[in-house]
Image (cartoon, rainbow, N blue to C red):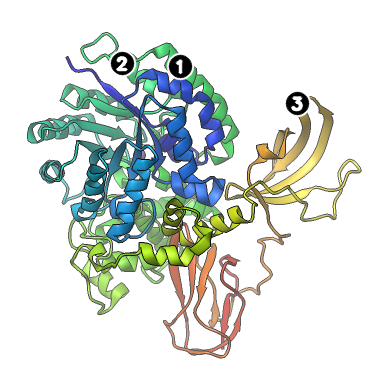
Amino acid sequence: MAQVQITDTTLRDAHQSLLATRFRLKDMLPVCEKMDQVGFWSLEVWGGANFDSCIRFLKEDPWERLCQFRRALPNTRLQMLLRGQNLLGYRHYSDDVVRAFVQKSADHGMDVFRVFDALNDLRNVRVSIESVKAAGKHAQGTICYTTSPVHNVSVFVAMACELEAMGCDSIAIKDMAGLLTPGVTAELVSALTHAVNIPLHLHSHATSGLAEMCQLKAVENGCFHIDTATSTLSGGTSHPATESMVAAFKDSEYDTGLNLELLQEIGAYFYGVRKKYHHFESEFTGLDTRVQVNQIPGGMISNLAHQLRDQNALGRMNEVMAEVPRVREELGYPPLVTPLSQVVGTQAVLNVLTEERYKSVTNEVKNYLLGYYGKSPTDTNDVVRQQVCGDEKVITCRPADLLDDEMPRLRKEIGHLAESEEDVLSYAMFPDIGREFLEQRAAGILVPEPLEPVDSGKSVCGAPPVEFNVALHGEKYHIKVVGKGLASQNGRAFYVLVDGISEEIIVETLDELGAIEVSESTGTNGSTRPHADAPGDVSTSMPGVVVEVLVSAGDVVKEGDSLIVVEAMKMETEIQAPINGKVMAVHVKKGDHVNPDEMLIQIG
Ligand code: MN
């Protein structure tokens, strides 16, 4: 008699997959008491992109979020997703940072750590797993499932055996892209069940429409833990519905014993919450079977779509989808999971938009090719590596072996802005936005700023005016107020066009609007920079933020010299001099938003 146990991912992965990780704590806490009564094996509440989103967009302290979840869910295991040596950031951290991060997470009440490495390079998960065990918590080793000419069942079985030998308490099969089929699931789970003595968990994304069948096959073959999400945040790039899977096993030997009525109340609650976040719905909802061909995870598809839309190039999505597998092959078939999904995806976008493959290369791709992410599943393409890295030496050791302890330096750098070791770790994860977050907190301005008109030239209904550009949770909208209703007890209705689409909003309190930044008055694309058209005019191939300007007016540069570092979609790209010459003008500074076709630097 094997009862199926459920890990519900609604509070972490479901909104990360469907709504760009934007759920605020205050929209989740009211239902926690109910969720705590269900009897889930665990609730995934933290980690993945949630830490980043808290600091970057929501202006919530992620550690405080964890504390509050712990208080609100006293009877259920809390679970997080941890990217091995990358923790919750995008680079490799030294071992002392990894140990401190895991210890602090455990102190705040984390019970289950699902630890993975994007390359399945187990050297990159060892220190995290040791730290979890040292804290007396549950270490779940992870197999990132992918398909390629170099991935097969015996490779994954060997990984599972190694994870068990490292001391893992369980093993997760992480099918982030929805690539598993029922037949392969049965084969894989059966092989793993025979090879290891620790429980298996299956994390399936529903993208390709096969996840429920895979979970059934997994259960029938000896994997009795499955990940689901509440029905109203299930399916598509999210997970199978909790209620459906509970119903599927009801009255069978696998009965979960969970109360369907209670689960449905939770589903109804999130039906309302989801509507509040409708601006963040992915372009691609429902089924997308293309993943069975291109292996692109759902979250990555929406990122690519965002990026292409910013470029006015959404029509090139199919070209990018075709380019992703090519780049992946050249990089030695990395699984497409964070951060490598972004590394591969951004390079594919660059290759398509610049119309010349690897003409523009992100720093991440270069570092990857040099071995700084770990060992690729198979060798990278020699020609590409030579083109990108020249004669630079490829490392073969564990990347973190090259790092000295970092905590002392980090504490010193962030200084009095850090009120705790947790703050130092937030800063370690995200040096720029982490510092900004701590500065804003110190200045007491982590409260929403009021909306302000940026173009006061127009007036509606005799009132002061009414065209705004706003950034809400990191997304930009053009808002035009076209009418307003009378104030009532519920607030006042405003009739507005959001990016040209008619909406009615009821303004209750400013808090309802979240953290709002008002951008400066914009022209057509927000720039006052000259248009780039001469051969020496340096522009960016994608919209982004300037991270560093490496030259000044008067400098003499050679073709290929790095001039500016731009960050787009969390990736850094160096922009190089197109010709030999002298820097005549620099039109950017650190922190500027830049767009294609703008002249950022002029070389004459
Ligand atoms: Mn996931």
Quadrant, the C terminus: bottom right
Give the SS element for disc 2: helix
Marks 3 and 2, how far apart at CA: 42 Å
Where does the image place residue 451, in percent across and percent down from the top left?
A: 73, 48
Q: Which amino acid type is shown beneath numbered disc 2?
A: Ala
Residue drawn 57% across and 50% down? 474
What residue would you read off at disc 1?
Answer: 264
Q: Identify the image quadrant of residue 182.
A: top left
Residue lying at the far left of the rendered structure: 194
Question: What's the mark number on residue 248?
Answer: 2
Residue drawn 23% across and 55% down? 124
Q: Earlier in the sequence, mark 2 or mark 1?
A: 2
Residue lying at the far top of the rendered structure: 251
Q: Nearer the viewer, residue 241 or 513?
A: 513
The answer to whether residue 237 is visible is no
Crowd class of label 3 (few under 14; some 14 to 19; many from 20; radius 10 Å): few
Question: What's the mark number on residue 490?
Answer: 3
